[in-house]
Structure formats: C-alpha cells, structure tokens
Amino acid sequence: MTATIETPSRPAPFAGRELRRVPPTAWVVLLSGILLLSIVFSVTLGPADIRPAEVWGSILGHLGLDPTALGGQVLSPLRDGIVWELRVPRILTAAAVGAGLALSGTVMQAITRNPLADPYLLGLSSGASLGAVAVILLGFGLLLPVAAFAGALAALLATLLLAGAAGALTPTRTVLAGLAVSSFFGAVTSLVIFWSATGDTYREILSWLLGSLSGAGWPAVAIGAGALLIVGLPLMLTGRTLDAFAFGDTAASALGIGVNPTRWLLLTATALLTGAMVAVSGSIGFVGLILPHAVRLVAGQRNRVVLPLSALAGAVFLIWIDTGARTLFDPRELPVGILTAVVGAPVFALLLLRARRIR
Amino acid sequence: MATVFRFSAHARRATPLLGAVALLMLTGCASAAPAAEPSKPAAPAASAYPLTVENCGTEVTFEKAPERVLTIKSTSTEMLLALGLEDRLIGQAFPDGPIPDALGGEDVPVISDKVPGQEAVLTLEPDLVYAGWESNFSADGAGDRETLASLGVNTYVSPAACKEAGKPDTLRFDDVFDQIEEIGALFDVPGAATELIDEQRAALDDLTPVSDVSALWYSSGSDIPYVGAGSGAPQMIMDAVGVTNIAAGVDDSWTPFNWESVVDANPDVIILVVSDWGSAEKKIGVLQSNPATAKLDAVVNERFITVPFAATEAGVRNVEAAATIAGQLEKLGL
Amino acid sequence: MTRTESAHGLGDAISAAPPAALAASRLTFSRDGRLVIDGVDVDLPVGSFGAVIGPNGAGKSTLLQLLVGALPVDSGTVLFDGADLLALRRRDRARLVALSEQHGDGDTGLRVNDVVLLGRTPHIGRWASEGPADRQVVADALSAVGMSAFADRPFDTLSGGERQRVHLARALAQQPRLLLLDEPTNHLDVRAQLSLLSLVRAQTAAGITAVAALHDLNIAAAYADTVIVLGEGRVVAAGPTASVLTGKLIGDVYGVRADVLRHPRTGRPLIAFDTT
C-alpha cells in the first residue's frame, strides 16, 4: 500500500503572506539603512536649534576631520557639547538599548515558549530597580549603573537557583520563580522608598523606574554597545538552537541540543544583556515584549530571522521614541517608557489586525 | 498553564514598577505646587467669628481662633512662628529642613518625618491641621478634609499650593502677603500680620535688582533636571532680584527640564536649591561630571548661588530667599 | 515462567540472530524515586520494525526517550551498530537517531519547510546557515512522506495526519539510521494511520531500523516485525510479532480477553477483543 497524497484544500490563511516572501536578507539591509538614516536625522532634532551643517561639523571635528569639509560648519564649544556630549551619545545609547531589549525579549520568548515573556522576566527589572533606588537614596547617584547591574544579577541568580533547585529548568518553573523573585524585590524596593525617600528624590526614582535615556553620555554608549557586541551578537546567532525548541524540550534534545545547559546559558546571557541595558536606561518597558512579536507578524517565526530583525527594529524604534520624548514637549521631557507604550501599542494593534493567523 | 503565564506576566510588571510608582505618589507628591490665588476675605481689623474662608475649593469655618494646631511641611510651621503663634502649635510634621533660629520653634515636637497617618493626627486632638501641600490631606496621608471636618478638625492648605481652585496665572509677593493676612485673620492676630507684611515689603524694596543676568533655578534631579519654571515661587523670587529665568517659558511652578536647553541658554548663574537630600556639592558634581554642562560659563566660573529648599516654597521665607540670592549675586560681582 | 526470565530468554534469542542493529541492555530509569524502566533489553536487527506495546504507564514513551538520549539512564547501555549511543556527543547521536513525537498542540508559526529543516539542526554547524544540500534533504524528506505540495503551508493549519507526516519528514531529514516514533498514529483516522505506517515500512525497507511505541495492537500486529511488550517498566515478552501476540499474553498484560485470528488477505495476526 502506498501513501496517498492529500491535496491542499484550505486557502492561504494569513494576510501577511506577501510580506514573508521578502527574503530575510532584504529585510536586514532595509532595516540597517533605516537605522543609519534614523541616527543621522535624529541628531539634528532637539530643543536647541542647531543646524544640520553644525551637527555635521561637530561630528567631523570629533572624528579628527576638518569640520568645514563636506559642508560642515564650525560651532561654539557649548553648541558642540550639545551635539557631541548630549545628542550623539544619547541616540547611540537608545539604539543599543532598543536592540538589546528586543533581542533579549526574542530569546526569552523563544526559550520559555511564552509569548508574554519579556527581558525582565527573571526579576531583572525589580532587581535592578532595587539596586538603583538604593544608591539614589543613599546619595551615590554615580554608582547607579553598577548597582542596577548588580541588582539585576542578584535577582537573576535568585530566580535561576529557585527555578533550577528541583532539577530541570523548565519554562514554567522559570517563569514562576521569576514571579516570586520579582514580587519580593519589588516589595523591598517599595519598602526602601517608603522608609527613606526624602524631598523630591522620588522624582529621580520615578524617572528611573519609568526608564529614561536623558542621562546617557559616552560611558552609557560604552556599556550599551559593549554589551550588545559581547553578548548580543552571539545571541543573535542562536536562532537555529532556539528554533529547535519549537516542539518542546524532548524534541530539542532529540535534535542534538543540550536542553538544560542551553537554557542556563541563554537565560544568563540574556540577563547580562538586559542588566547592562537596565543599568544605562532604567527599565524601559514594552520594547522587549512587543517588538519581537511585531517582527514575527511581518517576517515569520523563524528565530534565525527574527533575532537580527528584532535587534534592528528595536534600535530604530527606541531612537525615534526617545527623539519624541526629548522634543515633543520641549523643553520638558517625557519619560520614554510612557511613549514606548503610547506609540508602540497602536502600531502593534495594527499589525495584529492584519495578521489573522494569531488566535 | 496559559493562565498561569498570563497572570505571572502581568503581576510581574505590575509589582516592581506600578507598586513603586504608586508609593512614590504617596510619599512625596505635589512639589509641583501650582500657584493659586489665595481667597481674600475682607481683612477684618479684629476677627469676627464664626469666620468662613474658601481654601482650595473647600469652605472652612472657624468658630474661634485655632488653639491646637498641627502643621505639615515647613512653610506652614514657619508661617505660624513668624506670626508669633508658637504657643498654638502642638506639633509639626514633614519638615523640609531646619527652621531658622530667628523664628524660634525649637520646642515644637516633630511628630513625623513624613506625612503622618490619620490616627497619629487625631491622637493629638488638633483643632486645625495646616498643611503646605494639598496632597498632604488624603486618606492615606493625614486624612481627607471632609473626614477631618466631620471629626471637628479644621483643615487649611497654603493657598499657593492649591491644585485647582482659583489657580492664578503667576504667583506674586502680593499673593504671599495675602496669605499672611488671611492667617492673621484666622488666628485673630491681624496686627502681627500687618507688621510682618510691612517688614517684608520694606525688605523687598531694599533689594537692588540686577539686570541682564540669566539664571537656572536648579531644584533637583540629575539626568532630568527639575527646575524652577515661569509661574511659581522660584519665578517670583527671581523677578524680585532681577534675574532672567531660562525656564520662564514653561507655565508651571517647577518643571522637569532638559540639559540641552540649559546648555543652549548658557545661564550666567545657577541657583542651587539646597536640602538634606540634595546638597550643593551633589548638584555641582552633576553639573561638572556631564561633559556638556561642564562647559557652561556658570560652571566653569563657579558662579553658583545657594538657597535653602524650605525657603523656596511660597511662604514667609521667600523674601529672605530673595535677599540671600541678591547678596550672593553682589558677591559674584553681578 | 516469570516475566524476567521470559524477557531475558527472548532477548538472548534475538541478539543471537545477526546482525543486531540496536542492542539496548538492562536499561533502568527512575523518576521521583520510582523505577519507571526496570532492566529493559531491546534487540533489533538492521532494517526491522519493532513495536513497543503495553498499557498506559508501562513506560513506552520513557523507553524511547532513553534510547534517543533525551532522558539520562540510571544504568544500562545502548549499542547501535556496535557504537555506544549514550556515550556519543548529542549532536553526533542526533545524526544517528531521530525521534518523532506525538504532538497535539501547535502554535509554532513555522511553515512546513521550516519544521522539516529543524531536522537538519545536528548536521549544520552551530553558527552556519543551511546549504543547498540541506535544502535537498528537506525536499526529499517531504517528498518521501508525500507532503511536497505543503512545503510553504503554515504548519499550524495542517490536519493531525498531515502534521504527523511532517514530523516524520523532520525525523527523516536528520538522516537517521535509527528512527523512533512515539504514538505516531494517535488521533489519526484509519486511512491516515495506515498511510503513516506504510511510510515507516518504506523507510525500514531502505535499511533504517525503526521502533514505534504503539497503542493499537492491530497496527502493531499488521506492521511490526518484532514486538516488545512492556508492563510496569519491564519487558513482559519480546520476539517476532506472530509468536509474541497470543491471546494469553494480551489477556495477562491488558486484562482483556483476546482472540488472535489470521488476516484473511495478509495472513498477519488480527486481534479481536472481548471484555467478558
């Protein structure tokens, strides 16, 4: 007896079909181009009125070139400071943080097989918050990135130990352990604030809890870009491994993946990346949760494709959101975490409506 | 399983962030106190009780001059001390800093470093709770105004800190003086009020305003500077000494600002608000460590002026704040 | 005779018949302190199709997961063609052994092609991309299970039978020499069941050794060369299908009355059940 072949009977089931025909490399090239243009264009925007030629002159000057070459213009040290010490590092940090968070979110969602997973899943955000709030209240504001990073790692460690205590690091145990650790660190943070917040230090804490790139200078660029390079880039290449988890742990194992070591390694790498991002920007929500889904809706589910595209899309998204945060209510600044959701949610809803496949 | 995930994801986001944010709202809100026009009762020569005033949209009736007063925040404590009403004070709470020696008040017990809870307030059996911020009166703070009224406790908020009712465009010294007058009337010490107002007017008139000096009123914050804006006590004080506020364009008492605008404006002086939690050194450190603000003329030439936090909210110390700023401007040769 | 004696006696008999491709001996595995697999032997010649049968909870799926290395054995060895499977590195093992599991769920968002391409995971370098050769293997695997026309369809929209065939194709894309199938006919209609088993038989005809955990005794009777009967983690009986599947054994293991008839056309055993 031979296998009978059933003919396909159902119609093409989703609207995004044509978009998926675009080859992944084309997406990467397109988004890289948009990223570059976004950086160049957003540097010219800000509360201070600085002409593009001045921006160009400042950048040329700092790259060791003649500022007046290629149409650049020499500008005063103060205006140069606005471009080179405030705008450029802030935009580059936004790009790194956006990319890092989106990347972390993609990995977290794939490895826990939970669409609601985000970079802060393992209690990272609450751990970092506790570290940050503690140093703000103790008055050592300059140690903030270190404390936030240390807090994130402490939370990660607590979560992994709790989740892995009984052996296998299953997605469910990981998520639940993260919940317990989050709740605890969150409560301790609240307790610390209640106990010792004085005057208007709360404003500083609030800005940090909602996420902000306003303090991002070159050290932040170094941290963000460094983490992206050292941890993010290798993570970006784990797509095939993540895809192997599509049918569960046993299937992954049968495909030659060491399930437990892989999960430990990827969770730890993701946490390091997120910890670095949280340290420079506070916990910016939404980017890591929604952007990976948005990318999947457009470009399909293969993590090998989704990872680099998420990183690029995250960078572009956060650059523009932060540009909005610094310019929309000029001279006031909007906490960037508010804008990420206000702008991101409708965009995501639109994508969701287009893609009827998701049930 | 799916349900667990869903629950966990939500609770997780909610706990660390929203919880803490909500808490922040409770512990210290409303320093962005919008200026408000104090209600102006026909200032009586001698108070005729019962006396009813409209205070931040709430009608408060005084049957007699209050005798057991609890003050919350420094501005209210200092107001009573300046009017010689120390004997009416049964306690103070949530002080913003030390009270100047000249005002006395060392014997007034501090019942709480923060906003006291309802029970702590009621145990003292006050007949008036006088708060510096409207938000001090809430169910999870000192109690809401209606509840306290129903228990026979009157409430009063510094009118400059009213949130909505009768909000004036811009706070002026006349508004502060009106408040002194109103308190004088409520406590049946109109003479002391008039004396204090005359004294303060004279001190103001003595100031020689500078001109062509721009200033940043740096209240707090590091990544996002929180600065004195165009319509509250900071602007009022800066107007009195003649400096131009670089953040005057924002119609608020205080506002979150951005360093780019500060660098762009390059102010001649920077006024540092000093408190227990935010020393001048810390703020100077922030300015010097950011490569962009480090190049500001005021930072390079160390043209810093300090003013104590408690003197920068609308109250009896605003004139003193203006005087100290004027003195420091003079020392800087401006 | 006791169960253990029967198991070892038959195991020895089979291993004596060359060439033994799969030789697992004395496998034990416990979960939460309870022995789930207790001294199990499996011996199969190259190109044969072995069926693992037994009541629910007998340890059929666990046995397959031990053979593929997804669960660690407490003791015992698995030899395949003389190589110690459990000592191999995971990736190397995954090039020899493939497992096709039962899956009810599906919200993977992957296309059929992508699912089958997963089978190439152990063959493609960790940081490398798939090449034309890999794509050819995927196409061949899809064609072998008659699903070529579905290559670009979203996996989640397929029927149960179609999904099982794609899972089989994914396992075939691993180019395994030992193919493990866990309840491959679950939730399938009768035609889909028969067509899937025919596909497996086509693979064994090509030299692949196959082991399937099966619920349906008549499917096992119709397709398997060898039957391994598990009960409470032990081998109750093992050997050529026709000699193992007796009415008495089925009665002992499943607690039902069964008569083994002969299929009028194929001549294979055919089991009729009766509970009274």
Image (cartoon, coloured by chain):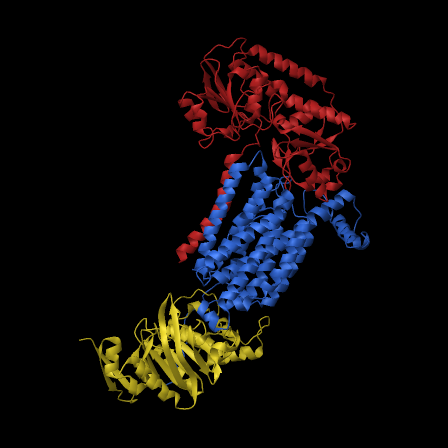
x 51%, y 37%: residue: A194
- Residue B86 sits in quarter: top right
Specify the farthest residue to the left. C276
Q: Position of residue B305 (x, y in %)?
A: 71, 30
Q: Position of residue B266 (x, y in %)?
A: 74, 37
Up/down of B171 relative to A205, above or below: above
Q: Is residue C113 visible?
A: yes
Up/down of A79 relative to A226, above or below: above
Q: Is residue A42 visible?
A: no
Up/down of A24 relative to B230, above or below: below
Q: Position of residue B90 (x, y in %)?
A: 50, 20
Q: How many marks?
A: 0
Residues B4 and A288: in front is B4
Q: Position of residue C86 (x, y in %)?
A: 47, 77
Indicate left or right for A185 with B331 as reference.
left
x 80%, y 55%: residue: A65
Indicate left or right for B52 with C185 as reference.
right
Indicate left or right for B126 with C192 as reference.
right
**Which one of the lettered chains is coloured red?**
B
Residues C51 and A322: in front is C51
**Which one of the lettered chains is coloured blue?**
A
Chain C: drawing colour:
yellow
Specify the quadrant that holds the N terminus of chain C: bottom left
Specify the quadrant that holds the C terminus of chain C: bottom left
Residues B100 and B188: in front is B100
